[in-house]
Image (spheres, rainbow, N blue to C red):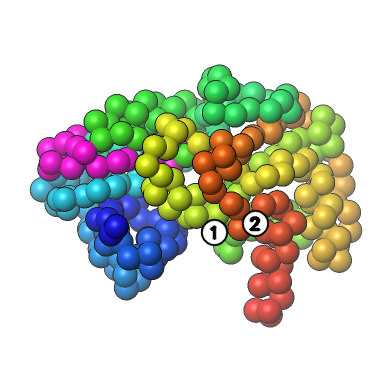
Amino acid sequence: MSKRILIAGCGRLGTRLGLELAAAGHQVIGLRRNPEALPPGITPCRVDLLDDDLAARLPIGLDQVYAILTPDQYDDEGYRRTFVTGLERLCRALRDTGNHSARLIFVSSTGVYGQDDGRWVDESSPTEPGRFSGQRLLEGEAIAAGHPGGAVIVRFAGIYGPGREALIRRVERGSPCQAEPPRYTNRIHEEDCAGVLAHVGTLAAPAPVYIGVDDAPATQCEIMDWLAAAMGLPTPPRESGTAGGRRCSNRLLQADGYRLRYPDYRSGYRSLLAARRSSV
């Protein structure tokens, strides 16, 4: 059945998701401050979540709302303004416009976890973030959870894909990887982020929280060594650090039917490297 879907914060990921939803037959509206760049298939809605006339400009008759928000500055105030104040205003505007029954899907981060010793975490693990970013996202999760139409929170780990190639650039620069203690990392390809968000939107009875990562947490050195070999570059030098990261489980997401397009870093980065070579 076709749905009327709003993507609040229709940037890079939101646009990819919007095109996927539109291709599935849904009516997609992309809310952003500057919507001129939105492609055909996504109806633009020019508004900022902090605008005084937000409710007056919000579409009506929505079945589903995605909140894929990006702070305008990466400090505590920027995160508070976006993930606390901005989300509060969005939820209030949904109620004021009669969209209170629309399901809300809020994009959060595995940064809400504070575990940093290599242990496994899942949706039931304690959320005790030590950094302001995780703390503000956790506040945002609580706001989303109070939405009367029901909410689903998706906690993504490090997103990579075309234009999101920080680890590749680290290897190209000859930067070191943390070997002691081993630094565990988690990631998900941008295509799978869109796939996960589209998938949870189809579930009749979704869980309240999902972790969005691939099947294979790996150490920083393992991935950078693989990338160096694949690009014909020297093995990255080693360094010591103070924390070991965490390993995030996607078992709940898989149990609810999602199948990853890129199940591990090898498949994802192999595709990225092939695209880079073909563009040269």
Instruction: Tell me the quarter of the image containing the N terminus.
Output: bottom left
| Callout 1: SS | helix
Q: Is residue 119 left or right of residue 226?
A: left
Residue range (magenta): 92-109
| Circle count | 2
Marking on residue 191: 1
Q: Which residue in the protein does label 2 denote?
A: 262
Q: Is residue 108 magenta?
A: yes
Q: Is residue 89 magenta?
A: no
In three-dimensional space, the C-alpha distance between marks 1 and 2, rounded to whole angstroms, equals 8 Å
Expressed as whole percent of the image width and height from the top left, the position of residue 133 reads 49, 32
Expressed as whole percent of the image width and height from the top left, the position of residue 16 reads 44, 62
The structure residue drawn at horizontal position 78% and vertical position 31%, both measured from the top left corner, is: 241
| Callout 2: SS | loop
Instruction: Tell me the quarter of the image containing the C terminus.
Output: bottom right
Give the amino acid at mark 1.
Answer: Glu
The structure residue drawn at horizontal position 73% and vertical position 64%, both measured from the top left corner, is: 270
Q: Quadrant of residue 79?
A: top left
The foreground one among 83 and 216 is 216
Q: Is residue 15 visible?
A: no
Marking on residue 112: none
The foreground one among 213 and 139 is 213
The foreground one among 61 and 140 is 61
